[in-house]
Amino acid sequence: MYRNKKSGIIGIIITVILLILIVIFSNGENNTSFFENAASNLVMPIQNGLTYLKNKLSGNSTFFTDINNLKQENEELKQKNSELEQSLRELENIKTENNTLKEYLNLTEKYGEYKTVPGYVINKDISNYSKTIVINIGKKDGIEENMTVIADQGLVGHVISVTDDTAKIQTIIDTASSVSCTMSNKDTIVCKGTLENNTTLKAMYIPTEANVIQGDSIETSGLGGIYPKGIHVGTIQKVENTQNITDRYALVETAVDFNKLDTVLVIVNE
Amino acid sequence: MKKTIINIVLILTVFIIYYLQSNFFNWFTISGIMPNLFVVFVLFIGLFANKTMGTIYGIVIGLILDLLIGTKIGIYAVGLGLIGFLAGLFDKNFSKDSRITIMVMVLASTIIFEVIRYFLNYVLLSNSVEIMNFVKILVIEVIYNLILTIIIYPLIQKAGYYIENEYKGNIILTRYF
């Protein structure tokens, strides 16, 4: 026992470091950028210097003849650049204004007729296989079972149980959830949650004659009794054709980012 | 007296694990997949206390989890209760002195728990079945659990033998002869 004590502690430290590294490197590029930056900072200055030297040496013969032409060209380009930049700025202003106006219009159009109660997400599921969330409003705020929950961007899920102060919500990305939806050409499909990731749904039972378009917007159809009609769910990302056209399916990207979800709205009146 | 203190500490540990699981491990994940410390905890109680304690703790913790975040009541309770019972059987048949056996037990019980839960979910909630994705998640989860077991093994051993002394009498010496 005592013989291994030291090696045991070292083993534990190594495991902790390994675990932290695995967690950092397995979670996408956001976390690794720090290390990438550090590595590139170490190497890049020297690399830049070397490249500069190499270019200087190889381009030495035409260096002096080109210099006058270059000066002229440079001035012209500078002028053009400033003009373009100005117009770009104007365009960007118009773009953002347009976007905000559009958003206002859409929101009031879509969700104006519903009476909603806002709530915060206070707890997420602790397992990898189901995706329920808990919010901080309950019976006292008028929440009941089977009420629809939305966020600013679109559909979140429905309430499965309530206590006095909290409500449990089954999100649409849960594998046990299925939502009846319509595409823009009024064909009905069923969107189910998948285990694969947190942002896509699997749209099944596509009618054989239906024409599925990539980037098509998906809304709830109002069938099934829980979700009201016309709430935005997401957009079609990809259509998977199988051998038999009856069981082809599409992947739907949800409008709501469930990894960053923190405020939701519960639709109170039906 | 000592037993009540042990039980209070164990119940506090349940809450600590719950907060860890729902706050810390929600973002400290391996490619989005978190470990399942409750399985390790129930296995630990069943191994070092006894079979009945393991089962009771499993069922009670499971019910709490079902009420807090589960969709249908009973899924966690059945799974964790069974793990507690199995831990009692492990205790009879295997030695607990080496790290490897504990790791194998954690591996086995994590797999058993998740398969049972997935099956119950399928039966009760009509989940769509995705075997490949399920296996992928399960493998990463098991690896994560094993890494955590390696890290907390000294704690498991110390606390474990303390509890075992209380519940089964001093049988540690007899094991070596």
Image (cartoon, helix red, strand yellow):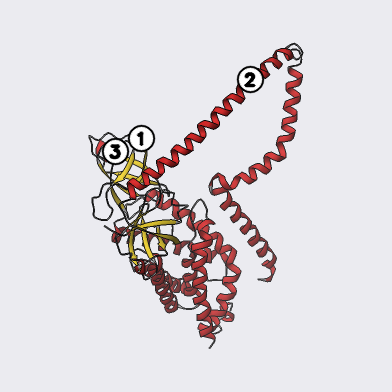
Decide which of A9, A70 is in the foreground and name it: A70
Total marks placed = 3
Helix, strand or loop at label 3? It is loop
Residue marked by disc 3: A184
Distance from disc 1 to disc 3, alpha carbons, whole Å, reads 11 Å
Disc 1 crowd, CA 10 A, few/some/many (<14, 14-19, 20+): some
Decide which of A151, B146 is in the foreground and name it: A151
Helix, strand or loop at label 2? It is helix
Q: Are marks 2 and 3 in contact (CB under 8 Å)?
A: no
Disc 3 crowd, CA 10 A, few/some/many (<14, 14-19, 20+): few
Q: Position of residue B39 (x, y in %)?
A: 46, 66
Q: A186 above or below A5?
A: above
B160 on left or right of B134: right
Q: Give the chain of mark 1.
A: A
Residue marked by disc 2: A77
Helix, strand or loop at label 1? It is loop
Residue marked by disc 1: A214
Q: Are marks 1 and 3 in contact (CB under 8 Å)?
A: no
Residue at the extreme bottom: B1
Q: Please determine if labels 2 and 1 lie on a single subunit.
A: yes
Q: Amino acid at mark 3?
A: Ser
Q: Amino acid at mark 1?
A: Gln
Identify the mark nearer the N-term, 2 or 1. Answer: 2
Q: Give the chain of mark 3.
A: A
Identify the mark nearer the N-term, 2 or 3. Answer: 2
Distance from disc 2 to disc 1, alpha carbons, whole Å, reads 40 Å
A225 on left or right of A149: left
